[in-house]
Amino acid sequence: EDANKVVKLAPDWAKGYSRKGAALHGLGQWADAVRAYRQGLRIEPENGTLGEGVRTGIAAITAATGEHPSWLDAHSEGQ
């Protein structure tokens, strides 16, 4: 909830998306976490924390499902 408020109040602050992604990842909502990290990467394409968030989110989805989430590859901006 707090992370959603941050990105609403400061949509151009990449760290807000990093925090949102981390919160979603912690909740096991990995696809939404990857989306949040990628939103941050649109603002700061070279942000290593956001890039690592995308990679760990994809790895978590792969581990949970046994398959690489190919639907994420179609939206690989910032990767």
Image (tube, rainbow, N blue to C red):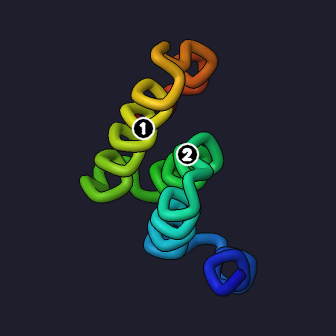
Nearest the viewer among 69 and 63 is 63
Q: Is residue 5 above or below residue 18?
A: below
Residue receiving disc 2: 30
Nearest the viewer among 79 and 53 is 53
Q: Position of residue 72 (x, y in %)?
A: 57, 24
The answer to which image quadrant residue 2 occupies is: bottom right
Q: Secondary structure at mark 2?
A: helix
At horizontal 30% and vertical 56% (from top left) the residue drawn is 47
Pick the quarter of the image with the C terminus. top left
Residue receiving disc 1: 60
The answer to which image quadrant residue 59 occupies is: top left
Nearest the viewer among 59 and 55 is 59
User: Dot 2, crowdedness within 10 Å: few (<14), some or many (≥20)?
Assistant: many
Q: Is residue 60 above or below residue 49?
A: above
Asked whether the beta carbons under mark 2 and mark 1 sit within 8 Å of each other, the answer is yes
Q: Position of residue 55 (x, y in %)?
A: 34, 37
Mark 2 and mark 1: Cα distance apart in space: 7 Å
- Three-letter code, disc 2: Trp
Looking at the image, which residue sits at the far left? 48
Pick the quarter of the image with the N terminus. bottom right
- Three-letter code, disc 1: Ala
